[in-house]
Structure formats: C-alpha cells, structure tokens
Image: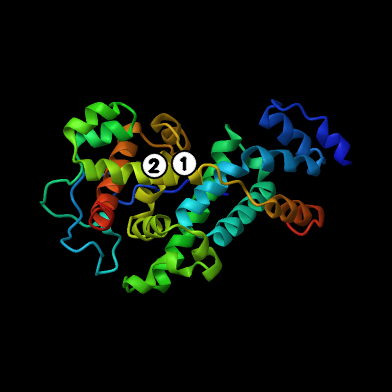
Amino acid sequence: MTAAHVLTIEPAEADQDLINRILAGNQELFSVLIRRYSDPLYRHALGMTGSPDVAEDILQASFIKAFQHLAEVRGRFDAWLFRIVANGCKDWLKNIRRTHLSYDEDDQPSSYATPDEELDRTELRSDLDQALSHLAPSLREAFIMKHVEGRSYEEMAELLNTTVGALKMRVHRAREALQTLLEEKYA
Amino acid sequence: MTLERDIHEGADRPARQPATSTPTPAAGAPMADRSSAEPPVTSPALHAWLDGELSDASVAIAERPHVIALWKRLGADAAQLRRVATPASVEAIVMARIKNGSDR
C-alpha cells in the first residue's frame, strides 16, 4: 500500500472502520490513528513523567502494544488506547519509586530529566513537576487530565472507568497537596 | 491483554490536608497518601473557580489574592503545555517497527 492510499482516508472515518482495514492488511493506516490521538496522549505522558524523553518512549511502546493487540479493541478505541498509555505512565512511576525508596529532594523523578531538558523548563514548571512527584499516581493523573489536558470530569470518568465524584475528590486532593507544596515559594 | 487496572490506590478518601508542616515528604510515601486532622488549605470557592463554576470576581472575594495568583500562574503554565505537540519521531519509529514486522 502506498502513501496515496493513506491520504484517501476521510478525516471523520470511524476508528473501528480504520481498525478493520488495518487488520485486513493495510498496516500503513495505523499512522492515521497515531496522528489522530498522539498529541493528547503525549501531553498526558509528559505531565505524568515530567520528561519529554520518557514520554516519547512510553508513547512509542504504547502505540506498538496497541498495534499488536488491535484485534482486541472493544468499544471506544481512544479510551482503550488512553488506558495503555496511562498504565505505561503508572508503571514507570512505580519503577522510579521502587528504585528510589528514599524520598530526599535529590531523588525526585523530575531530577532524572537531562540537563538540556531542565534548561528548557521554567522554574515554575520544574517546581510543579517536583511537587507532582510527591502525589500518588492516581492523584497526579487526575490533576494532569483536568488541568493540563483540560478534560471535563465526565470525560475523565469515561476514560478511567470511575465516577465524577471520585475524580473530583482526587483533583481536590491533588490541588490541596500542590498548594501546600508551592504556596510558600510562590505566594 | 489486561488493560484495566485498579486506579484507586486509596486516593478517593475524604480530602484532608497532607500531614506536613514542612512541604517535603520524608518517609517515602506519596504525600497525599498520608493523613492528618488539620483542616484543608484550599477553599470550596477556589475549587469551584478552578472548575469553572465561579467567576474571577467571586473568587476574589472568597480567597486570598496570593493563592489566586499562584493558581493563575499554574493555569498559564498548563495552557503552555496544552500546546505541546508529539515529536514527529514517534510516528516514524512506530511505523518503521510495524513495517519491519518485528512487533507482530
């Protein structure tokens, strides 16, 4: 199949139609799904990890995993794909915690960014990443989805298979913790 | 493939202020997993404003100016993050690996 075939895809072509064509052998069409969904997923991984390099690695691994298991998609592809990325982020956070049991300042995940990445950040961004690293992954996830990705509670509930009330609680707890951590320096 | 996970991790308990008079967790546990009896530092008005349910003018009456300023700065930073695009290398690498057939 050539690139010309890819260009014949209607912008609004349903995900399931694309998936059916990919499973029938048109593997190049997977790039349409990547372009359709990668930006919000990349921002999610970036917010969760604080590192562009790690976010890119998680996204690549997630898309490949999605491709390998494409026949198993039931329901909304974007929600299914989101959960692959979200779980990849949580696994990364667990590994960071497991290998750095002491939570001294120098052990925070944000310190794992390369010097170049650090230079690109504002001081506030760096401090926010640091503060986010103190949160439980589920609180960090809820905060990132609400404030960085700009999702509604209803959309978050659909993606995470939980209730709006539970997510409001997580976001409120995250705000509470972040304000405690950042208020002294920035207020 | 199992994609669903237990995502709760005890995070849906009623909100409490993190157990801290110093801002840095010392025992290795995520800050919000710990609890204390201290009252919350964030007000209902602040949450309503951040959720888009309260106007700037209304929250200015109910909340301290420096707290509003902090969240406005965080909001501006988040808006900047919302403009970040995926590096082009992601699509290229994924499609190359698919094409090579090494992942099926």
Asked if residue A4 is positioned above or below residue A101 in the image, the reply reads above
The image shows residue B14 at horizontal and vertical percentages of 20, 43
User: Which residue is pictured at 52% across the width and 70% down the height?
Assistant: A115
Report the amino acid beneath label 1. Ala
- Image quadrant occupied by the N terminus of chain A: top right
Q: What is the number of the mark on residue B79? A: 1
Task: From the viewer's perspective, tell me whether residue A155 is left or right of residue A5.
Answer: left
Which residue matches tag 2? B75
Which residue: 29% across, 26% down?
A: B55
* Secondary element at tag 2: helix
The amino acid on which the numbered mark 2 sits, given as a three-letter code, is Gly
Q: Is residue A128 visible?
A: yes
Label 1 crowd (10 A; few <14 / some 14-19 / many >=20) = some
* Image quarter of residue A39: top right
The quarter holding residue A5 reads top right
Q: In the rendered view, would you say A129 is above or below A146?
A: below
Residue, x 17% and y 33% (percent of image)? B62
